Amino acid sequence: NREIHLASRPQGWPTEDNFRLVETDVPTPGPGQIVVRNQYMSVDPYMRGRMNPVKSYVAPFALDAALDGGAIGEVVASEADGIAVGATVLHQLGWREYALLDATAARTVDPSLAPVSAYLGVLGMTGLTAYAGLLEVAAMKPGETVFVSAAAGAVGSLVGQIAKLKGAGRVVGSAGSPAKVERLRTLGFDAAFDYHDRPVRNSLRVAAPDGVDVYFDNVGGDHLEAAISAMNPHGRAAICGMIAHYNATEPQPGPRNLALVIGKRLTLRGFLVNDHNDVRAAFVRDVAGWLRDGTLAYDETIVDGIENAPAAFLGLLRGENLGKMLVRV
Ligand code: NDP
């Protein structure tokens, strides 16, 4: 069994030196436990925060221990009632080839309904984040103009498409390369721009000439400031993530135009996907239906080998992914 440990805490941008590949024995299950051979593991932006020694809404990663996070694989040994060898399970012990866990910490999924990787992306936490953030947190209504940042990423690409499927009037996305902008056009975004080309507020003014009603924030920084300037009265922002801040070593300044929230009566609302299990049933019904009839597309960027999981994570922070970044273990 090979697993990835956190060797040291990154200061600013992480590097390969912060990680260590460690060999251990393949575990054997005790009563009530299973051993899973991981097939895919997720790398996610929130993991950067867990590398800092500060408590947030999730505990920090421990030093010199395996990292963890979403993973899916096949049960290869079981001492638990109800989960048989051969079952496919979703769980939280990624960053390793073999995971030992209590059966109660695993959720069985049907691998015949979708490619198993989809349970870590479009049909999993990523998809629910997009769905709940857009429809519940921001309460998007048909006809509205939606702007989403990191729009070619896992969450963002679903936000834009779900907005169109739920009747948005206009959907605008920003992303970090010409190829990503081109992909957004083929995904059905009405307008898309590369945020490197010119200040975001200038690009947004052209892309959303009638203003923005809903902003789905994955980035923070200049994107949030530009969105506040572009938002229409009673606009709502779902604050999902601020990836532009995650590697900063100092607290980042807030939007300079924050006072606009008063006159425009804006709502800026942060959220965590874990609080939105109440929409899970609607999410699964809608997304499974859209996947079946081909109206929802999802991209995956797959890196092979557990030894390359740190590189996949670093690549995610640098924007090397189109859609969901995954490691095939
Ligand atoms: P993505 O697939 O979107 O990958 C991250 C992307 O962020 C990169 O591909 C990169 O694309 C972009 N990016 C990186 N740095 C910057 C920057 N400085 N400015 C603008 N864009 C940048 O990741 P996810 O879809 O998994 O996550 C998206 C966001 O949602 C993150 O902020 C994450 O923390 C948040 N999140 C929040 C959840 C919640 O419960 N609140 C749950 C899940 C995710 P590009 O090439 O375009 O720069």
Image (tube, rainbow, N blue to C red):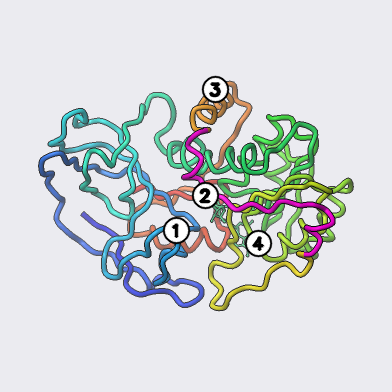
How many residues crowd mark 3 within 10 Å: few (<14), some (14–19), many (20+)? few
Q: Quadrant of the N terminus?
A: bottom left
Q: Is residue 198 above or below residue 236?
A: below
Q: Is mark 1 within 8 Å of ligand 1?
A: no
- Residue 328 within the segment the image draws in magenta: no
Q: Are marks 2 and 1 in contact (CB under 8 Å)?
A: yes
Q: CA distance from mark 2 to mark 3?
A: 28 Å
Q: Is mark 4 within 8 Å of ligand 1?
A: yes
Q: Are marks 1 and 4 in contact (CB under 8 Å)?
A: no
Label 3, on which residue? 292
Tell me the quadrant of ligand 1.
Answer: bottom right
Tag nearer the camera, 4 or 3: 4
How many residues crowd mark 1 within 10 Å: few (<14), some (14–19), many (20+)? few
**Mark carried by residue 220:** 4
Q: Are marks 2 and 3 in contact (CB under 8 Å)?
A: no
Residue placed most toward the observer, 296 or 70: 70
Label 1, on which residue? 57
Tag nearer the camera, 2 or 3: 2
Tag nearer the camera, 4 or 2: 2
Q: Residue 167: x, y in percent?
A: 74, 30
Q: Where on the picture, by quarter, is residue 64? A: bottom left
- Residue 268 within the segment the image draws in magenta: yes
Q: Residue 85: x, y in percent?
A: 19, 32
Tag 3 secondary structure = helix
Tag nearer the camera, 3 or 1: 1
Q: CA distance from mark 3 to mark 1?
A: 35 Å
Tag 2 secondary structure = loop
Q: CA distance from mark 2 to mark 1?
A: 9 Å
Tag 1 secondary structure = loop
Label 2, on which residue? 272
- Mark sitting earlier along the chain (2/3): 2
